[in-house]
Amino acid sequence: MCFYRRVRNVYLRCGHAINLPEEEIKCDSVRCKFSPNHPSTCVPPSCTQTCWQYHQFPQQYAPNIDDLCPNCKAQR
């Protein structure tokens, strides 16, 4: 199934965190309606019975970066 990836960069030197824009990660399944491989001929009502109709739970990452955030760097 397709899913969203959420990244929140945590900057250790200033303690700030910045959320990056969500990114949609596409799967290769023909049974996922969000996939680029989902056939255009697959339409309701059969599509709603045979194919995934929602995204998988989002992946969440919070990398710790040993640096100042971009805003704090700009103020120096």
Image (cartoon, rainbow, N blue to C red):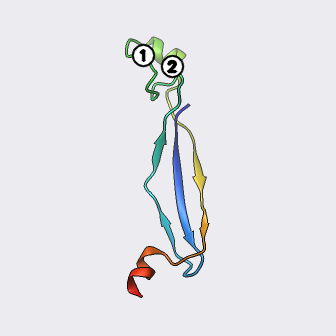
Whether residue 66 is situated above or below residue 57 in the rendered picture? below
Q: Residues within 10 Å of mark 2 (few under 14, many from 20)?
A: some
Q: Nearer the viewer, residue 15 or 42?
A: 15
Where's residue 60, x and y in %?
59, 52
Residue at 55%, 76% in the rendered image: 67
Q: The residue under label 1 is which amino acid type? A: Pro
Figure quadrant of the N terminus: top right
Instruction: Give coordinates of residue 61: x percent, y percent.
Output: 60, 56
Image point (52%, 76%), residue name? 16
Q: Position of residue 43 (x, y in %)?
A: 40, 14
Q: Secondary structure at mark 2?
A: loop
Position of the C terminus, as image quadrant, is: bottom left
Q: Earlier in the sequence, mark 2 or mark 1?
A: 2
Considering the numbered disc 1 on the image, is that residue within a helix, a strand or a loop?
Answer: loop
Tell me the crowding category of disc 1: few under 14, some 14 to 19, or many 20 or more residues within 10 angstroms, Cα based: few
**Residue beneath the point at 39% across and 86% down:** 75
From what the image shows, is residue 54 above or below residue 48?
Answer: below
Q: Residue at 53% of width from left, 31% of height from top?
A: 27
The numbered disc on residue 39 is 1
Q: Which mark is residue 70?
A: none
Question: Would you place residue 17 above or below residue 52 in this image?
Answer: below
- Tell me whether circle 2 and circle 1 mark residues in contact (CB < 8 Å): yes
Check residue 30 in the rendering and tell me which mark sits there, or answer none: 2
Residue 39 lies, in percent from the top left, at 42, 16
Q: CA distance from mark 2 to mark 1?
A: 7 Å
The disc labelled 2 sits on which kind of residue? Val
Q: Is residue 71 above or below residue 27?
A: below
Q: Residue furthest bottom?
A: 76
Callout count: 2
